[in-house]
Amino acid sequence: MLDFSTRPDRNWSWPTAIRFGAGRIAELPVALAELGASNPLFVTDAALVSLEPAQRALGVLRDAGVAFGLFSEVHPNPTGAAVDAGVAAFRAGGHDAVIAFGGGSALDAAKAVALMVRQTRPIWDFEDVGDNWTRVDTTDPVPVVAVPTTAGTGSELGRSSIITDTEAGRKMIIFHPIMMPGIAILDPELTVGLPQGLTASTGMDALCHALETFITPNFHPMADGLALQALRMIKEALPRACENGSDLEARADMLVASGMACVALQKGLGGVHALSHALGAVYDLPHGLLNAILLPHVTAENIEHARPRLTELAQLLDLPGRQAESVIAWLEGLRDQLGIPAGLAELGVVAERQDEVIALALKDPCAAANPAPFDAALAQRMLARAMG
Ligand SMILES: [Fe+2]
């Protein structure tokens, strides 16, 4: 039995009500009751539903005699069609809440299902552009309990979902404040079985959220504080979680840090996410892995526009050399240590489709927050560097 005394159970309101602690998935029925739900729809992804964490959660519901439906038709990079199917399942089963269970794709799809159950407009009308969010019908919102099984996206504490519009061929950020789950259960035991590769790539997504947030020039000291503490925790915990998946303290710290980084990203992200959304739409590749590869290259292209912040970060993290370049060296070293490819070419990304990727990236809402003005020439330089 691991000594877990330094990571005791805690209840936080940040601003989602959070039940943090090992084994707290057992409180899923209590969380549902708190939200007034008696017949939830459990939404998860097709690959996860038969694995231990999902089976454990479903067992908790069965043992407590909770009536529920199961929708497990979510695949990586969820589409509008997947959300429609989930909405149909919700209505057919007369459900009154959603349990969002899994990694980023499952959580995003589940949150979108909960939102869309009460809408008459198509989901694309709520893309996070301008004041589109005010179009949402907020009558009788569907409550959501979110349970992450990866430590990366932080979607369990976020107010948006990334859904792929297959017709337009791009990923859209769907946003409304009511998309924030009512309760999140952060149980590190659910992430213990995550394979090393997924632990690394999802953890690097959280690192990207924190780093892009910390260096984007917008004024948001509260987000800066969250991002910085997340970076400190990830720096220590991610290598440990990758080296020993059963290190419950490292797993716990990664779950908390990824949530913090997600709350912080309301400040704005940048070129890593603008490009990874575009590459994800064109090649249907995993978000975390794309970010992990892009991060050192994009940060290197941004260095002259983010030098004071990167220097501050190098000093606060006590990186060797304590200067902006030290951050790039740390990111490259971490990437190599975690076995992440150095370049996009290894994933099958080709120069021939570069214009397509750049056109999508320029339209991405994250592009505007990049420290250096994000134009086609900069995107091209970033991609060229990241090809490897
Ligand atoms: Fe991300």
Image (cartoon, rainbow, N blue to C red):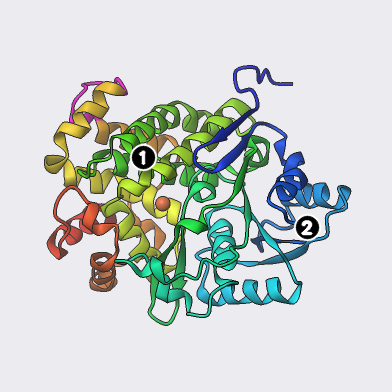
Viewer-closest of 274 and 256: 256
Residue at the image point whose x is 26% and y is 54% from the top: 271
Secondary structure state at the residue bearing disc 1: helix
Q: Is residue 184 visible?
A: yes
What's under tag 1, amino acid-wise? Answer: Ala
Local SS, label 2? loop
* Magenta run includes residue 276: no
In percent of width and height, residue 64 lies at: 86, 48
Q: Position of residue 349 (x, y in %)?
A: 35, 64
Question: As displayed, is residue 365 above or below residue 313?
Answer: below
Give residue 210's mark: 1
Q: Which residues are magenta?
A: 317-326
Q: Quadrant of residue 31?
A: top right
Upstream in the sequence, badge 1 or badge 2? Answer: 2
Disc 2 residue type (three-letter)? Ser
Q: Position of residue 94 (x, y in %)?
A: 75, 71
Q: Is residue 114 left or right of residue 171?
A: right
Q: Quadrant of residue 195?
A: top right
Q: Residue drawn 25% across and 36% down?
A: 328
Q: Left of 300 or right of it: where is 264?
A: right
Give the labeled residue for mark 2: 38
Q: Label 1 neighbourhood size at 10 Å, few (<14), some (14-19), many (20+)? A: many
Q: Nearer the viewer, residue 56 or 86?
A: 86
Task: Give coordinates of residue 170: x percent, y percent.
Answer: 38, 72
The secondary structure making up most of the magenta span is: loop
